[in-house]
Amino acid sequence: MKKSVEVGIVLLVLFALLSNFQLLYKAARFDFQFIEIDEYENRFENLKKALPSRGVVGYMTDREPLEISQDVIALAAYYLIQYSLAPLIVVNSLEHNLIIGNFYETEVDGKILEDKGLILVKDFGDGIMLIKRQNK
């Protein structure tokens, strides 16, 4: 094998390991103990009553979709919503009729929703919203 190919493979492996170590470091720094699952589930109790018991709903946050997978806290929040609303399936997508909004900035500009073709159905407070797609 050529020396340049070997160097390229080594660099690729090093970058992959560095990326994984960064994620592991962020996860190690994050204190998961502060999240009480019961408390988190209670946060979605009113939302759960407004949703169908089964099916698929979308999910949005004020974090970018790519950022969710790279942000330990946003990813934990997404997984906890999935857990709290099971057996309803929550998908990180705006392509469904009903969408759950989980916003870190509790004041959401209605223009953001409108620009994405979405309408606020109900604001449950604490950054939790039920949103639907506009009919076109």
Image (spheres, rainbow, N blue to C red):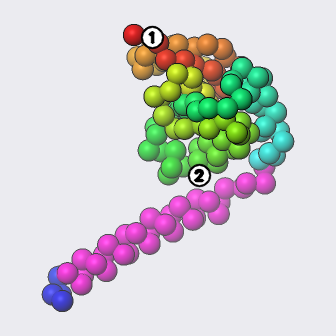
Report which residue position mark 1 lands on.
Answer: 135
Tag 2: residue type? Val
| Magenta-colored stretch includes residue 50 | no
| Magenta-colored stretch includes residue 16 | yes
Principal SS element in the magenta part?
A: helix
Percent of width and height locating residue 107: 60, 20
Q: Which stretch is magenta?
A: 5-34
Crowd rating for badge 2 (residues with CA inside 10 Å; few <14, some 14–19, many 20+): some
Report which residue position mark 2 lands on.
Answer: 72
- Residue at 44% x, 65% y is 19
Percent of width and height locating residue 129: 64, 22
In the current view of this chain or complex, which residue is farthest to the top? Answer: 136
Query: Residue 38, relative to residue 51: is it above or below?
Result: below
How far separated are the C-alphas under marks 2 and 1? 34 Å
Percent of width and height locating residue 78: 62, 42
| Circles 2 and 1: CB atoms closer than 8 Å | no
- Residue at 58% x, 33% y is 56
Residue 3 is left or right of residue 17, and the answer is: left
